[in-house]
Image (cartoon, rainbow, N blue to C red):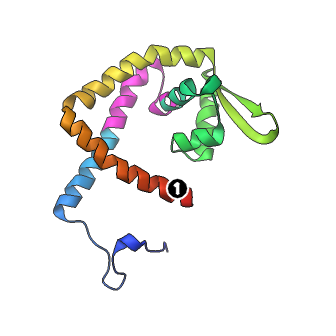
Amino acid sequence: MPTQSLTDGDPRTGPRWLTDQEQRAWRAYIRLAQLLMRQLDRDLHPFELSMHDYEILVELSEAPLRRMRMTELAERTAQSRSRLSHQVSRMETRGLVSREGCAGDKRGTFAVLTAHGAAAIEEAAPYHVASVREHFIDLLDAAELTALAGACEPVLERLRLVRDRD
């Protein structure tokens, strides 16, 4: 049984159930995240990329020398090392990335963006950005985007602290 967090409320009185407003916000967020990712994934389909592929290609394209340790890539893409390893294997088969050993660290491995992977993200990126705009950014005004970023940042910070503690 998981241990109860200090933020769960008093264990003697039970959990702090969500209010109607909190439930509405939580469910809207979950549904939004699911449907938006599904749509963005669909919009990448003509490029034979998934959102997971795209996210990995972005991280590698922005990394020094277009390479990143697998452990860091797993962290940046919020995937387990095992799941990332399987994803990278599928991408290797398609020639989008390759793996290289780390000099001086026999257990370490780099994921490396290939020329084919760089061309794939270069081709898909303008369409992906247009999709993000159409299905998300352009539906919100500047104040809403600012409020959304402000609302997400403390949650992200809390999750980073929890991750770093584990």
**In the displayed structure image, the side of residue 9 where residue 93 appears, left or right:** right
Q: Magenta segment, which residues?
A: 36-54
Q: Which residue is mark 1?
A: 163
User: What residue appears at the point 27 percent right and 43 percent down from the top-left corner?
Assistant: 148
In the rendered view, tell whether residue 109 sits above or below residue 151: above
Residue 48 magenta: yes
Q: Is residue 140 visible?
A: no
| Quarter residue 84 falls in | top right
Residue 100 x %, y %: 74, 29
User: What residue appears at the point 24 percent right and 43 percent down from the top-left corner?
Assistant: 147
**In the displayed structure image, the side of residue 155 where residue 77 appears, left or right:** right
| Quarter residue 41 falls in | top left
Is disc 1 placed on a helix, strand or loop?
helix
Residue 26 x %, y %: 27, 54
Q: In this orientation, which residue lies closer to the viewer: 89 or 75? A: 75
**In the displayed structure image, the side of residue 150 where residue 3 appears, left or right:** right
Q: In this orientation, which residue lies closer to the viewer: 77 or 31? A: 77
